[in-house]
Amino acid sequence: MNIYDISEKSGVSIATVSRVINNNPHVSPKTREKVLAVMEACGYVPNAFARGLGLNTMKTIGLLCPNPADPYLSQALAYLERSFRDTGYNCLLSCTGRELDARIKSVEEMKSRHVDGMVLMGSTFIEDRERNNEYIRNVAHTMPVVLLNGSYPCDNVYCVVCDDQRATMEAAQYLIDSGRKRILYLYHSRNYSGRKKLAGYKAGLESRGVPVDDALIRFFSEDKMSVVQVRDYMLDLNKKGIEFDAVLSSEDVLSIGAVKYARQTNRVIPDDLSIIGYNNSSLCMCSDPELTSVDNKLKTICDQCVATMVGVLQGRRDLPQKTIFTGELVHRGSTL
């Protein structure tokens, strides 16, 4: 069943059916009612692309996600899709991967689908070399782009971020103020957000007069950050004689690995080892003891991404290019 069939059964032109579908006012009530009755009887649902051609909007937003299996990004997807749906927009998802060529291809493919705007999820999309960001600048010439928890100064690109540097700094300061001096920092990303968190860790130590020890800064690639792998890595550090009395991480799963390490080495949490995660995910409540973590205001950030995108599409000109939210340390049983 297509628009031609509806035209034939209604006894009106294809143009008239199109005007009814697109809610054009230049259709008599009687004709509109007749066409809608045929559509309902036939179970006809207008094609979104066909409607978009008439309305100059697809009412569709492209969500581009590097890795939907990542707990942070999967939760962000859920928040974004629900919030866009509540405002009358559908979403198309593209799982881009993290390689530059794959991301560029995904952006171009999404553009070809005539979406109204794109949300790029995470600072993975921003490269250090400016020439590698040209693909974002190019697509922003044709539609608004919202960057979730990443920063890129460019016309028609709107950034909504958590102040990861400040949040991580305050977490490190809290550990030091509670008597910890040897804070092991575990992190999994070297992108914009990852760099901010690492800078926050160092700033927290320096603000309390604690020297930064590179032996206590440990990076985990995405394929080596499972709970078991982190636990075993920390056991190896212990065998090498690297001492620490606290763990601060850039992601909750890394801190859960630290909890497993403490259990295996009979270290009491938080008396012998204090642990703080990041993202305040559901993993925090599954830990024993429950995990202290930084709440990076993900739902608030996602809601603001949606509000910004919808506002831009509605023609608002008073929207900030960058919106920053402050994270909050949520205290639970893994810290004093």
Image: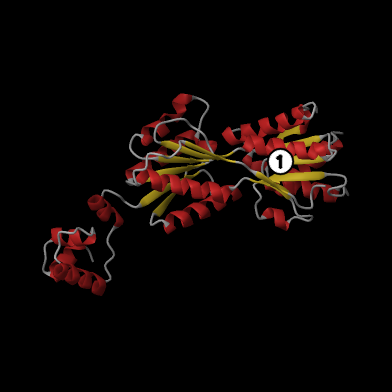
Q: Measuring from the top left, give residue 133's x and y in whole percent.
A: 45, 30
Please state if 14 lies on the left or on the right of 46 as rendered. Answer: left
For residue 23, above or below residue 247? below
| Residue name at image x 63 percent, y 43 percent | 327
Q: Nearer the viewer, residue 182 or 304?
A: 304
Q: Which image quadrant for residue 34? A: bottom left
Residue 236 visible somewhere in the drawing: no
In this view, the residue in front, 261 or 90, is: 90
Give the residue type at disc 1: Ser
| Crowd class of label 1 (few under 14; some 14 to 19; many from 20; radius 10 Å) | many
Q: Can you identify the residue that label 1 sits on?
A: 249
Secondary structure beneath label 1 = strand
Residue 105 visible in the displayed image: yes
**Residue 238 x, y percent position in the rendering:** 85, 38
Which picture quadrant has residue 137? top left
- In the rendered image, residue 132, in percent from the top left (x then y), is placed at 46, 28
Where residue 180 sits: x, y (%)? 84, 37
In the rendered image, the vertical position of residue 4 relative to residue 109, given as above or below: below
Q: Is residue 94 left or right of residue 27?
A: right
